[in-house]
């Protein structure tokens, strides 16, 4: 398991990278505050990606579904602790379903 300092750096970097990529999608806004990335759509719906330091996970909640993501050091990516799905694939899928178009992150 990552120590807290390593977790915070990886998590911060992931939130910033995702926010930068989301900036190009005009149908939503994204903001980082209080260790979380808030994704808000034009219709008022919100998705949230938050850091969970006690478990060293990122938690993503969207459309009444949530996932908990551990950092896979070998693959250098965040993966769902139950399904193994990559975090970026999940976020892209959920945003794409919401907007009705494919999204790549």
Image (cartoon, rainbow, N blue to C red):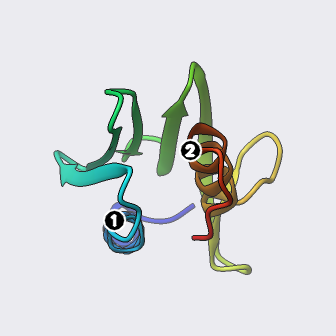
Nearer to me, 88 or 70: 88
- State the quadrant of the C terminus: bottom right
Which residue bears the numbered disc 1? 19
> What is the secondary structure assignment of the residue under circle 1?
helix
Location of residue 77 (image quadrant): bottom right
Comes first in the chain, label 2 or label 1: 1
> What is the secondary structure assignment of the residue under circle 2?
helix
The crowd level at tag 1 (other Cα within 10 Å; few <14, some 14-19, many 20+) is some
Left or right position of 90 against 32: right
Location of residue 79 (image quadrant): bottom right
Label ID, residue 99:
2
Can you give x and y, in whole percent of width and height, for residue 3 in the image?
A: 42, 65
On screen, 105 above or below 95?
A: below
Nearer to me, 24 or 34: 24
Left or right position of 71 against 86: left
Label ID, residue 85:
none
| Residue at 67 percent of width and 51 percent of height | 90
Can you give x and y, in whole percent of width and height, for residue 17 in the image?
A: 38, 74
| Residue at 17 percent of width and 45 percent of height | 34
On screen, 80 above or below 26?
A: above
The crowd level at tag 2 (other Cα within 10 Å; few <14, some 14-19, many 20+) is some
Nearer to me, 81 or 1: 81
Can you give x and y, in whole percent of width and height, for residue 78 in the image?
A: 61, 63
Q: Are marks 2 and 1 in contact (CB under 8 Å)?
A: no
On screen, 3 above or below 58?
A: below
Distance between the alpha carbons at the discs numbered 2 and 1: 17 Å
- State the quadrant of the N terminus: bottom right
| Residue at 39 percent of width and 38 percent of height | 48
Query: Which tag is nearer the camera, tag 2 or tag 1?
Result: 2
How many numbered marks does the figure carry? Answer: 2
In the rendered image, the residue lying farthest to the top is 64
Nearer to me, 54 or 96: 96
């Amino acid at each position: 398991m990552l120590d807290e300092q390593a977790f915070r750096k990886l998590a911060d970097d992931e939130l910033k990278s995702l926010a930068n990529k989301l900036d190009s999608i005009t149908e939503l806004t994204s903001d980082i505050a209080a260790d979380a990335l808030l994704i808000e759509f034009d219709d008022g719906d919100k998705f949230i990606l938050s850091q969970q330091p006690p478990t060293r996970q990122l938690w993503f909640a969207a459309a009444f579904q949530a996932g908990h993501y551990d950092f896979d050091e070998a693959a250098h990516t965040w993966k769902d602790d139950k399904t193994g799905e990559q975090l970026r694939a999940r976020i892209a899928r959920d945003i794409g379903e919401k907007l009705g178009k494919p999204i790549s992150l």
